[in-house]
Image (cartoon, helix red, strand yellow):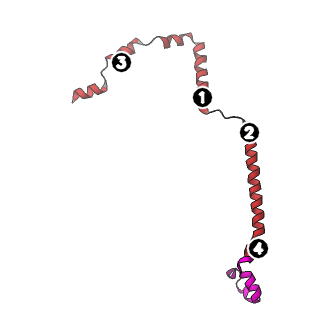
Amino acid sequence: MQSLLGPTLAALPPSRQAVLTGHSFFANLIAGPFKHGLVIVFTFALIMCLIAAVASWLRGAAVPESATTTTTESAIATESAADSPSADARVAEPDHEQQAAATSAPSRSSTVDSER
């Protein structure tokens, strides 16, 4: 406080200087407004939390995204299978040419071993 008051402090009587530069004057000076500010801030925070809780309650239970995606994908697959009877035939009959090529082709590891 001495540096804030500067030359004005020297013009005051010593008893007033002691009050102004003491530990209790400034603390008592800002205590009331500080408490009022805290009450306002915490009241606002409480109101905002209550609004958020009510909004969350009104929204209802959250559905996991994976459950929604799986349900949507299975519904699309079911609809396309129902629309196209040949889709079941394609799934039921494996491609014999691809199976023959897969079994006759040498594996990569056996080719690498034979080159060494």
Residue that sits furthest to the left in the current view:
116
Give the residue pinned by disc 3.
102
Q: Amino acid at mark 2?
A: Trp
Instruction: Name the residue type under label 1.
Output: Thr
Which range is magenta?
A: 1-24
Q: CA distance from mark 3 to mark 1?
A: 33 Å
Front disc: 3 or 2: 2
Name the residue beneath numbered marker 4. 29
Give the CA distance from mark 1 to mark 2: 24 Å
Q: Closer to the N terminus: mark 3 or mark 1?
A: 1
Q: Position of residue 49 (x, y in %)?
A: 73, 48
> Which-is-in-front pick, marks 1 and 4?
4
Q: Amino acid at mark 3?
A: Ala
Image quadrant occupied by the C terminus: top left
| Residue 80 vertical position relative to residue 40 in the rendered view, above or below | above
**Pointer 1 or 2: first along the chain:** 2
Which of the 4 image quadrants contains residue 57?
A: top right
